[in-house]
């Protein structure tokens, strides 16, 4: 593998896998451009070095071709604005026009391909199989797709001289553009600056954090955060648990959680996590009180109750006032802070106060010299909503990829470039 810093891009066409899977509103305007902004330095580096760029990404999870709702055409104006440069577009990723335009690229030019997931080959999962397809039919479809996936990957590779993987957010997927294509550039492959920055930031937090080190983990379900909680207990000094999963922990300990979200299947797991933390000397900080509502709605009546004594008919939708003060005081004592997941239903203003208090506490701690890393779509959306993104140390572009990497799993997109 090569280094983007030392590579001579003069006259070279670079195909760059970015993660432009960004949220769009009903008018197809980009709601959060974090991922696009993040990729700009890589694109600029290639152009400044005398190369040209072919951008490729997925958007959402389309299952057909074309699918207007998921067209990458919608985000071109945002890319052009942030890059300060015109971006050409080609709708048919594998057609003659793509090959022609790629071959005709001149130094300094940028071409973007349509959503790679319009093609089943990108993910390598057969589409359109009947529900009652037999095992033989499934096997045959998989085999046929494996073959056409090879062709698809070759086609993408044929457009360029060098491959850059800068899609950290998609690095946990072993897809044509994130992993397979790297083999077709045995030497001429490298990471972009997003990938390098993410790996360095996460490695430094996990390997040599300044202590005390706290992780704030929110989110509604214990079931989706088990392995990250277990991994973090090995690394941190304390763990702040917020969000809907609080109530599974409270109920597992015998508390009353009313109508709050709760996963009884996870009680043994929740108790085991608490036991493991105790054994390791890791303090778990739960929200002592909860802002509860009599319905899951912005119009609901609200009241605060202890998180483990919520009456029937009420559900916890945010942390309460005492918990806000507790969390902020705890965060203020820490030197390294990792935050993944909001602590309340912050999409509704009425239940956003806890997440906002956490965001502000993280910002204050950062101003006093702590290192703060925020990751995961929702916590990043929250920090952006409050305009605080540039007052924390690092905002990750990864959701699932960040969690898998922190859990110690090898990311296919990383491995393929290093190999
Ligand atoms: C994400 O936003 O999680 C990444 O872009 C990967 O998308 P996926 O979860 O649909 O694979
Ligand atoms: Mg995802």
Image (cartoon, rainbow, N blue to C red):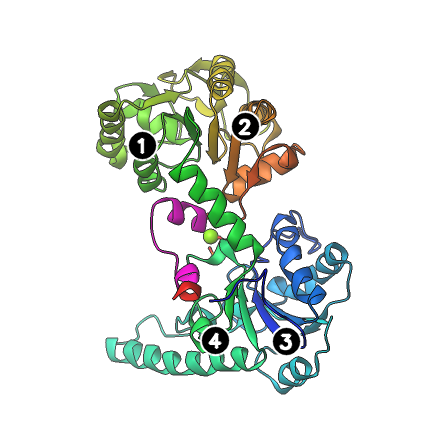
Using the numbered discs, state the Cα–Cα distance from disc 3 to disc 4 in whole angstroms.
13 Å
Pinpoint residue 150: horizontal percent, then vertical percent: 42, 80
Q: Quadrant of residue 174?
A: bottom left
Above or below, comparing residue 123 to residue 312 in the picture: below
Q: Which residues are magenta?
A: 400-415
Residue 290's disc is: none
Residue 153 or residue 206, whichever sits in front: 206
Which secondary structure lies at badge 1?
helix
Using the numbered discs, state the Cα–Cα distance from disc 2 to disc 3 in whole angstroms.
46 Å
Pinpoint residue 135: horizontal percent, then vertical percent: 24, 75
Mark 2 / mark 1, whichever is N-terminal: 1
Q: Which residue is mark 1?
A: 233
Q: Quadrant of residue 84?
A: bottom right
Q: Which residue is mark 2?
A: 355
Residue 12's disc is: 3
Pinpoint residue 230: horizontal percent, then vertical percent: 30, 36
In the displayed image of the protein, which residue is found farthest to the front? 6
Q: Which residue is mark 4?
A: 185
Which mark is in front, 1 or 3? 3
Label 2 crowd (10 A; few <14 / some 14-19 / many >=20) = many
Mark 2 / mark 3, whichever is N-terminal: 3
Mark 4 / mark 2, whichever is N-terminal: 4
Which mark is in front, 4 or 2? 4
Using the numbered discs, state the Cα–Cα distance from disc 1 to disc 4 in whole angstroms.
39 Å
Is ligand 1 closer than 8 angstroms to the Cβ of mark 4? no
């Amino acid at each position: 593998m090569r280094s983007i810093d030392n590579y001579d891009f003069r006259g070279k066409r670079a195909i760059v896998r970015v993660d432009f899977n960004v949220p769009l509103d009903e008018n197809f305007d980009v709601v959060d451009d974090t991922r696009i902004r993040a990729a700009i330095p890589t694109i600029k580096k290639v152009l400044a070095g005398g190369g040209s760029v072919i951008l490729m990404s997925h958007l959402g999870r389309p299952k057909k071709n074309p699918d207007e709702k998921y067209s990458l055409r919608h985000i071109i104006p945002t890319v052009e604005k942030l890059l300060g440069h015109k971006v050409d577009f080609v709708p048919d990723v594998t057609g003659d026009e793509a090959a022609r335009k790629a071959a005709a690229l001149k130094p300094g030019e940028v071409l973007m391909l349509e959503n790679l997931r319009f093609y089943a080959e990108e993910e390598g999962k057969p589409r359109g199989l009947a529900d009652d397809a037999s095992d033989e039919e499934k096997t045959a479809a998989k085999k046929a797709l494996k073959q056409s996936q090879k062709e698809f990957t070759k086609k993408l590779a044929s457009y360029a001289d060098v491959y850059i993987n800068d899609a950290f957010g998609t690095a946990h997927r072993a897809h044509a553009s994130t992993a397979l294509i790297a083999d077709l550039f045995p030497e001429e492959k490298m990471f972009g600056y997003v990938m390098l920055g993410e790996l360095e930031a996460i490695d430094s937090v996990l390997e040599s954090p300044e202590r005390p080190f706290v992780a704030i983990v929110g989110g509604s379900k214990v079931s989706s955060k088990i392995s990250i909680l277990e991994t973090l207990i090995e690394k941190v000094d304390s763990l702040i648990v917020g969000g809907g999963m609080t109530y599974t922990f409270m109920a597992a300990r015998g508390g009353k959680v009313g109508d709050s979200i709760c996963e009884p299947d996870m009680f043994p797991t929740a108790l085991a996590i608490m036991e493991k933390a105790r054994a390791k000397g890791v303090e778990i900080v739960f929200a002592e009180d909860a802002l509860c509502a009599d319905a899951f709605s912005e119009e609901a009546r609200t009241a605060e109750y202890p998180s483990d004594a919520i009456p029937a008919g009420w559900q916890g939708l945010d942390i309460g006032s005492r918990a806000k003060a507790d969390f902020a005081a705890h965060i203020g004592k820490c030197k390294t802070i990792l935050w993944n997941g909001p602590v309340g239903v912050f999409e509704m203003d009425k239940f956003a106060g806890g997440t906002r208090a956490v965001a502000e506490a993280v910002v204050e701690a950062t101003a006093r010299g702590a290192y703060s890393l925020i990751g995961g779509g929702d916590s990043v959306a929250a920090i952006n909503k409050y305009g605080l993104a540039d007052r924390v140390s690092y905002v990750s572009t990864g959701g699932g990829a960040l969690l898998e990497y922190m859990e110690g799993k090898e990311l296919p997109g990383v491995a393929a470039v290093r190999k």
